[in-house]
Amino acid sequence: MVLMVSGGADSTALLVMAATDVLDVQDGRGRAKIAQDRLCVLHINHQLRGADAEKDEQLVRTLSAKYGITCVVRSLD
């Protein structure tokens, strides 16, 4: 499963929830279990916001590493 993570509040929360098994889709079946070894984070740095874009990229890299999740970063201009 690939999670697209921008570094914003929503996608960062999704990453943490997926990594810590607390993702609850509220479909009546309980919490979703995500196979950690099949989880990958993808971050696209569009290089549009200067230093802020670099901070977002670093946050995504750091959180991915904290949870032992592969992180792929691509820079586009």
Image: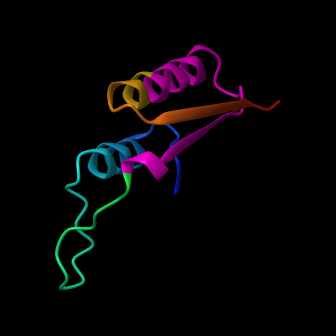
Q: Residue furthest front?
A: 37
For residue 25: magenta? no
Q: Residue 70's spot in the image, x, y percent?
A: 51, 35
**Residue found 44% across the figure and 39% down from its top:** 8
Camera-nearest residue between 7 and 16:
16
Q: Residue 43's spot in the image, x, y percent?
A: 59, 37
**Residue found 83% across the figure and 30% down from its top:** 77
Q: Residue 27's spot in the image, x, y percent?
A: 24, 83
Camera-nearest residue between 22 and 36:
36
Query: On the rendered structure, is 7 left or right of 47?
Result: left
As drawn, 46 above or below 4: above
Query: On the rendered structure, is 51 left or right of 15?
Result: right
Q: Residue 75's spot in the image, x, y percent?
A: 74, 28
Q: Residue furthest right?
A: 77
**Residue found 64% across the figure and 25% down from its top:** 49
For residue 41: magenta? yes
* Color scheme of the displayed model: rainbow
Camera-nearest residue between 69 and 14:
69
As drawn, 51 above or below 48: above
Query: On the rendered structure, is 29 left or right of 33?
Result: left
**Residue found 27% across the figure and 72% down from its top:** 25
Camera-nearest residue between 15 and 1:
1
The image quadrant of residue 9 is: top left
Query: What residue range appears in magenta?
Result: 36-61
Q: Residue furthest bottom?
A: 28
How many numbered marks have been drawn onto this rendered protein structure?
0
Query: On the rendered structure, is 10 left or right of 75?
Result: left
Q: Residue furthest top?
A: 51
The image quadrant of residue 65 is: top left
